[in-house]
Image (cartoon, rainbow, N blue to C red):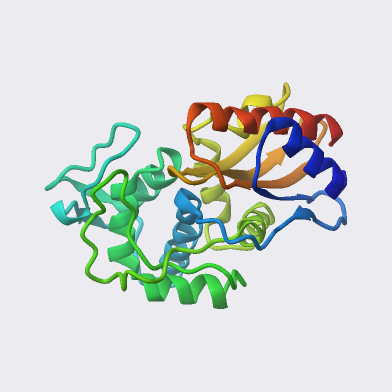
Amino acid sequence: MTEGLLADAAAQAGLQPFAAVIKRLDIIAEAISVQPDARFYPASMIKSPLAAATLSLVQDGILDLEAPYEVSPANMTFNDMPSPLVPGYRSTLTEIINLMITRSDNVATNMVFDIVGRERATEIVQQRFGLSGTAFHRKLSGALPLISDPEWDRVHMNTHPPSDASLLFELIARTQLPFATWLRDVLDRQECNNKLSCALQTGDRFAHKTGGTDEVTHDGGILETARGAAYVIVVYAGMPSIDENDARFGRFMSVVRNAL
């Protein structure tokens, strides 16, 4: 695996502009990357570090996974998948995190912004986990008009570069985060599987998170192969998340997977 192969795979798939990080975990190996610190908007990739920050507070005894939270009308926005989170519904933190990751639920994400706090979440991921390029600034909107978010300064956007996404997945894979095994199981139940997952081979297991807007499309996670090899794979692309572009991830992954 080389940077040149990643660039060739992206060119063949028509993923441009793009950034990628691949690192093997079951042996001592350096990461192979192309533009790992590219400043693409992270879209729903921001939900994985937000979940990690939340679970850190659970470990600290500040939050409780079984505590109930009522859905506020202020956090309502469009979701791609069905959601039980409607105004007045009371959901446990366990359910909220599961929905935020497995279905990329935007209402669940906005609830976590309120529960954890964006400044506290940013401090946790930067200082405890070393995700120096990651920050939480604005709630998520599934469609226009944007959700009303009085705490957003309307200047700074959420940030989570490919390098940070790769590091986060590595920390999860190595169980070096609070509730890492539990979070990996949640990622493993991902219901959005139209990108890198399309080119998995028999026996592969991919615990991952996707993200997309009308400007970007991303995917990344932890790949385990049938022969016992383990990798972190993260791919960001500066293209609209539409079926045609999302399918390019499968073509990219097909080339890369054959080279692993």
Seen in the picture, residue 1 relative to 59 is either above or below; the reply is above
Q: Residue at x 50, y 56 (%)?
A: 41
Q: Residue at 60% across / 45% down in the picture?
A: 237
- Indicate the quadrant where residue 142 lies: top left
Let me know if residue 229 appears in the view: no
Nearer the observer, 238 or 257: 238
Q: Residue at x 70, y 59 (%)?
A: 36
Which residue occupies the extreme left position in the image? 88
Question: Residue 61: which quarter of the image?
Answer: bottom left
Q: Quadrant of residue 252?
A: top right
In-image side of 142 versus 178 (left or right): left
> Which quarter of the image is occupied by the C terminus?
top right
Residue 126 in the image: state x and y as whole percent: 55, 74
Q: Residue 96: horizontal and vertical position, in percent?
A: 33, 49
Name the image quarter holding the N terminus: top right
**Where residue 68 sits in the image (x, y, percent)?**
23, 54
